[in-house]
Image (tube, helix red, strand yellow):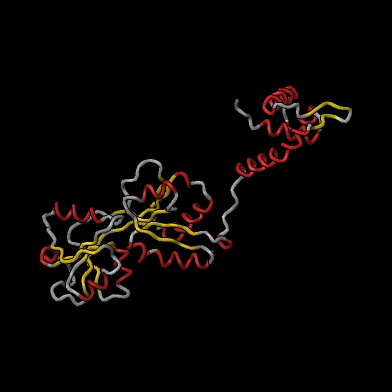
Amino acid sequence: MAFDLELLAIFDEIYKTGNVTRAAANLGLPQSTVSVGLGRLREHFNDRLFSRTAKGMLPTPRAQNAIGDVRAALQALQHALADQPAFDPAASEREFRICMTDISEVVLLPRLLNHVRDVGPGIRLAISKISPDSPLELADGSVDLAVGFMPHLEAGFYQQVLFDQHFVCLAAANHPRVGAELHSEDLRREAHIRVLTSGTGHAIVDKVLAAEGIERRFALKLPSFLGVARIVAQTELLAIVPFRYAAEVAASEAVRALPVPVELPPFQVKQHWHERYHADVSNRWLRQTVASLFLS
């Protein structure tokens, strides 16, 4: 037999007041509803629960034994239905799990870390790479947020554009054959680095260059972008990379960022989260923090 949670409130109020009429008034219910509710409670518990006496409706031993559990259940229900408390980063020791590209590790992560250190010194970040498993990880909560290029997400996800990216070609500052301007012939002649990673929009590059009849020769394949700038600076290899990455590494490595002679479509870097966590106060704080730092 189904049990109406409203019956718990009726049980508790009759126990407190010892009077069906006052219990109904306190609950804002018709007296008939409370009377029917008491009848259902008696049926559920297989006990009278409250007996009419000169001192009012007094609880039976069965009711006395049950009242603690009834009130605990009511309190748990009220807690579950209450508004979520505001997230306080200064007092939090939460670990946020973010998946991102290795380019974002270079371009975005240091700034995010410095901000979190200032506003929430107890907060920790756990970073993983965007992969084909990232949508499932966002859905099951093993990852809180994804930052990068994820064009094939299905229904159930929210996303927010942070900034636009376009591609440039990275070459050593002292490259012997590449001058101040990059030409299509340079792309065909020189050896290149291919980075085997997802979430960076590089499939766009391959498709457009192939359509233009430019076939690149890859002398090196890498699993990430983390070592690309140092390798380009110390060799004659070229690498087509997102502009923000090139601008970041050019400050510390002897490299040049050159416009690509073929028009490559831009792409958008977004933050992505699952609808299950859209209203979660800590997840919302993380998203708002990322947006405040990188939205342009």
Q: Is residue 111 left or right of residue 57?
A: left
Give residue 268's position: percent from left, percent from top. 33, 54
Query: In the displayed structure, does residue 120 sit left or right of residue 60?
Result: left
Q: Closer to the camera, 150 or 167? A: 150
Q: Is residue 186 left or right of residue 151?
A: left
Q: Quadrant of the N terminus?
A: top right
**On-image quarter of the C terminus:** bottom left
Q: Residue 93 location in percent, x, y?
A: 54, 61
**Mark count:** 0
Examine the rendered structure and indicate whether residue 81 appears above or below residue 289: above
Q: Residue at x 41, y 67 (%)?
A: 110
**Residue toward you, 227 or 13:** 13
Residue 252 screen position, x and y as percent: 32, 75
| Residue 77 horizontal/vertical position (percent) | 63, 40
* Residue sitting farthest toward the right: 54
Which is nearer the eye, 63 or 36?
A: 63
Identify the residue shown where x is 32% and y is 64%. Answer: 244
Check the image and report above or below for 57 versus 161: above
* Location of residue 55 (image quadrant): top right
Vertical order, 183 against 177 (above or below): above
Residue depicted at x 63% and y 29%: 4
Q: At x 56% / y 60%, what residue is drawn?
A: 92
The residue lying toward the viewer, choosing from 155 and 43, is 43
